[in-house]
Every structure is written in C-alpha cells, then in structure tokens.
Image (tube, rainbow, N blue to C red):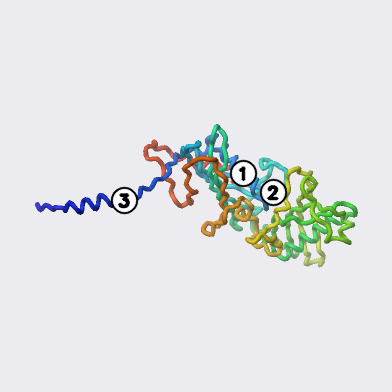
C-alpha cells in the first residue's frame, strides 16, 4: 500500500482557511401547532393589525393558519406565521367588527390574501414586528357559468354606473351631498344587454344636494369628528330590449366615527399625487397597494412589507423567509407529526 505524505505547510494553510470562513448563524425555529390557542391569538392580533392598516377596499377575515414557528430572543418569544385571508363584504370605512362581516363566496369571485407575519410575545402580550402581504382574486373558473365576473375598477362602464347610481342617491332635495370616496368592487354580466354591479364608498360634504347643483366646486368632504361615510351597492342595466337604463342602488350611511378619517383612501402615485379612479387598473384593491406602512414595495414578490418599530435593545430576528425557502429547525428537537396547516374557517 502506498502512503501519501502531505506537506506540513499545506495543512497549515487549510487550517487558516477553515478559520477564515465565516460561520452562518441561522435562527432555529421550533414548529408549533397551528390550532394552539396562543397561535390563534397571535394570528388574530396580526389580522387586527392588517385590517387597521388596510386603507382601501375591504376588510379581511382569517381563513387558515398555514404555518407557525417560534424562537427565543433576548426580549421574548418570536412567532412566525403564514396566514391565508379572505376578503369580506365590509368596506374599510364600515364600523362593523370583522368578526361580523360575511366572507365572499367563491361564486362571488372571492379574493384571497396571503400574509407572512412576525410577532413578539412579551409578558403574555403580542406585538407585530413585521408583515408581508399580497392578495389576488380566485380563478374565474371557481365562479359559476354566467355569473358576474370582476371588472377593472377603471372600466368605463363601471365609472358610468357609479356616476349614474350616485346621482340617483343624491337626488332628494336638501339632504347632504355625498361624493365618491372610492370604487370598491365591480362586476359585469350580459343579461338583456350589459348589467354592471358596483360597490363603492361615499363621504358627506359640507353642501346640501341643492347647493351642490350650483356650487359643486365649493363642496368639500367633512373631516375629523364631523366626517360621515357610507357604502353603496347597486346595479345599472343597459337594457338592449327596451333601450332603457335601469338603475337600482342602495346606500347605507354609517354613524359618525370620532377619531376615524378615511379621506386618505385616495390612491397616490410615488410622488404623493392622487391617482384618479379612471387610472386605477386591476379588479380589486390589492393588499400591497394599501397604506400598510412606510416600507418600499418588493418588486420581486409584488407584496408590501410593513416594518414596525422594534423595541429598544438588541433582538435577533431574521427577515421573513420566502415560502419556497425552508426555515431552519433545531435538529435537537424531537420529531413530531406535522401540526400545520390548521383548520379552514371558510373554504
């Protein structure tokens, strides 16, 4: 048998090279039961935070906790959750608690949201550290054949239907004059012509309907504690048979909500200038387009990162991992059966 002699200088170089290589320190996460009470509490805390920051479109409800992990930090336990949300029928201006808001069915062309969330638990209380969300409508194939399909919010027929129906609501004399706040949702359907189903938020102005006829430019939205918001849902049909336009609209005006102001719901471009509704494309108000924080939009994931000010002091928290990247799990932990995803609350 031949023996090989390695020069001592080569061993020395290899030893130095090993010492020079940086050691990658990965945060070790322990898997959690997605149905555990503390995980559901964390998920609800995250949901309240997301809905509180979502300034366009509709509130979201929790549909499923898809994954849950935890790790220890110097300031407490860090929870990492993956949540699936569903759009409700309650607009963000509605004072209704999200628990009472019905979720849109698949037939109604539901909108699904996906959020990665980090929370810190200290002294039994959860605080949100970071949120990353995106949303999209479900496939049109999930809706029934012939059912209304989502239309772009800047569709010409949609904007005309909103204008006609809101004009009808504002027709009575000497009531408050309401202006469009934002188009929330629109669907089109071919029935004896074209039927346009619209939903939109409105806000009261300082004018009456009579005053608005002669001095519309001087009408401004009521602000602060005097602000009044409402929500309209209606259908406008351009009947191809009788050549008539049929308008059906129902608007609900909410009680005043002291401390709440939704005048900021106007979409803005990167410069901060308002974007007119006729320039808003897309069939829904994406979570990534909402004012969820001051973080930049991620062009890679097409989602919005919500950085939250961390408590003072050092804390070892890594950025949220993409769903396709496995999170390190402590090998010393006992092997357990998968406890996630959790139950689905809706579908």
**Residue tagged by mark 3?**
20
Taking the spot 59% from the left edge, 53% from the top edge, the residue there is 135
Q: Position of residue 250 (x, y in %)?
A: 79, 52
Q: Position of residue 18 (x, y in %)?
A: 29, 50
**Disc 2 element:** loop
* Element under disc 3: helix
> Extreme top residue here?
123
Query: Does any portion of residue 322 appear in the rendered image?
Result: yes
Mark 3–mark 1 CB contact (< 8 Å): no
Outermost residue to the left: 1
Q: Residues within 10 Å of mark 3 (few under 14, many from 20)?
A: few
Q: Nearer the viewer, residue 300 or 76?
A: 76
Label 2 belongs to which residue? 92
The 10 Å Cα crowd at callout 1, few under 14, some 14 to 19, many 20 or more, is: some
Q: How much space separates mark 3 and mark 2, taking CA atoms?
A: 54 Å
> Residue 27: where, in percent of width, then height?
43, 43
In the image, taking residue 20 as reference, residue 208 lies left or right, namely right
**Quick one: 267 or 218, which is closer to the camera?**
218
50 left or right of 213 in image: left
Q: Nearer the viewer, mark 3 or mark 2?
A: 3
Residue at 90% x, 54% y: name it: 173
Camera-side residue: 257 or 236?
257
In this view, the mark in front (3 or 1): 3
Q: Earlier in the sequence, mark 2 or mark 1?
A: 1
- According to the image, label 1 marks what residue? 49
């Amino acid at each position: 048998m031949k023996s090989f002699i390695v020069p001592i200088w080569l061993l020395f170089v290899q030893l130095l090279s090993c010492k020079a290589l940086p050691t990658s320190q990965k945060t070790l996460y322990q898997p959690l039961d997605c149905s555990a009470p503390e995980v559901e509490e964390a998920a609800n805390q995250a949901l309240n935070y997301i809905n509180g920051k979502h300034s366009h479109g509709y509130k979201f409800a929790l549909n499923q906790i898809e994954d849950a992990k935890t790790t220890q930090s110097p300031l407490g336990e860090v929870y990492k959750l993956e949540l699936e949300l569903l759009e409700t029928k309650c607009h963000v201006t509605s004072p209704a608690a999200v628990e009472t808001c019905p979720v849109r069915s698949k037939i109604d062309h539901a909108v699904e949201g996906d959020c990665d969330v980090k929370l810190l638990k200290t002294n039994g209380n959860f605080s949100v550290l970071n949120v990353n969300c995106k949303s999209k409508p479900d496939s049109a194939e999930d809706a029934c054949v012939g059912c209304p399909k989502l239309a772009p919010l800047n569709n010409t027929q949609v904007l005309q239907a909103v204008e006609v129906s809101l004009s009808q609501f504002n027709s009575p004399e000497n009531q408050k004059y309401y202006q469009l706040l934002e188009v929330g949702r629109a669907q089109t359907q071919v029935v004896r012509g074209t039927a346009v189903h619209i939903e939109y938020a409105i806000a009261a102005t300082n004018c009456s309907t009579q005053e608005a006829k002669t001095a519309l430019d001087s009408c401004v939205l009521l602000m602060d504690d005097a602000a009044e918001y409402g929500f309209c849902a209606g259908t406008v049909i351009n009947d191809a048979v009788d050549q008539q336009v049929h308008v059906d609209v129902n608007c609900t005006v909410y009680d005043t909500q002291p401390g709440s102001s939704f005048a900021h719901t106007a979409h803005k471009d990167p410069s901060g200038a308002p974007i007119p509704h006729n320039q808003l494309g897309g069939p829904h108000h994406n979570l990534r387009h909402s004012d969820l924080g001051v973080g930049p939009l991620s062009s890679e994931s097409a989602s919005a990162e919500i950085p939250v000010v961390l408590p003072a002091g050092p804390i070892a928290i890594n950025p949220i991992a993409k769903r396709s990247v496995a999170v390190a799990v402590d090998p010393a932990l006992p092997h357990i059966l998968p406890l996630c995803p959790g139950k689905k609350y809706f579908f």
